[in-house]
Amino acid sequence: MEKFTIKNRHGLKIVTQLEKADQPAGLAIILHGLGGFKDQDHIEVFAQSFKDANYTVLRYDATHSFGESEGEYKEATTSGYYDDLEDVIDWAKDQDWYIEPFVLVGHSLGGISILLYAEKYPDKVKALAPISTVVSGELMKQAYGDQLETWQEKGFIERPSVSKPGEIKILNWSFVEDLKNIDTFSEVDKLTMPVLLIVGNVDKYKPHSKILYDKLPGQKEIHIIKNAPHTFREKEHLYEIKQIFDKWIKKL
């Protein structure tokens, strides 16, 4: 395992983690969700499936999150997550281990980021796995529901972090304002590569995955994990997801 620190377009440090295969079958790039980090249990599971299939795996902490990269969580936006993804790939393409087309995997906000990237650069993407994904700014705002009014009045929303016990997550209203620019449906016809969707049965974003699945034009599959929330933490859920990924990767 190797770690590299690069700078994004805004001058903030991004910490990446690379695990190279000796004779790689491909490259997988993995992105966590809002307030997540590259070492979360479900991210580890995604990575392990690709390592088991002899892929080189690159994952990183987005800026404005709770990982090793710079920035404050309160300043996070979907556009910022997407920009980081572009910047990491732009750096990666100059490395000797880079392989194109590559597989993109993203959880939640990472999911919509990889969808947007694949729509913009479809020839670079071999396959796509948006997990527990959101698909448009408007639908995300609807999912927040009654929280939006108080959020706008205060200028921020706060809640305790489950992934980082003891941390309080404060997110500015600018996150919601940014959502007006986010929509994956306008160019969904470009997503002709194989797509794997996984979502928990009790995830409030489950309808988003179903809407996306119906619109996808190419080879696709969707798996609903029984009794699973938005972020997968239970051992039985992680085990099931590992089996799904292992089978899917063999088809690529």
Image (cartoon, rainbow, N blue to C red):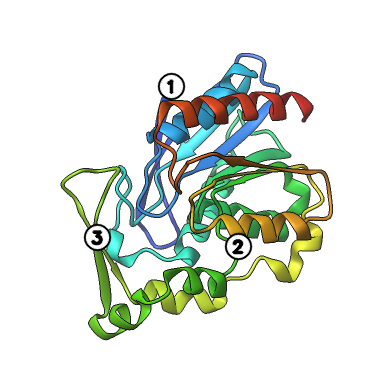
Q: Amino acid at mark 2?
A: Val
Callout 3 secondary element: strand
Residue at which label 3 appears: 159
What's the amino acid at mark 1? Met
User: Is residue 16 among what the camera can see?
Assistant: yes
Q: Specify the farthest residue to the front.
A: 227
Sequence-first disc among 1 and 3 = 1
- Between marks 1 and 3, how big is the CA–CA gap? 34 Å
Relative placement, left or right, of 145 versus 168 is right
User: Dot 3 surroundings within 10 Å: few (below 14), some, or many (20 or more)?
Assistant: few
Task: Give SS at disc 2.
Answer: loop
Q: Residue at x 68, y 38 (%)?
A: 102
Q: Earlier in the sequence, mark 1 or mark 2?
A: 1
Which residue appears at 29% of the width and 57% of the height?
71
Q: Which residue position is annotated with label 1?
A: 1
Q: Observer-nearest residue: 215 or 206?
A: 206
Indicate which disc residue 135 carries: 2
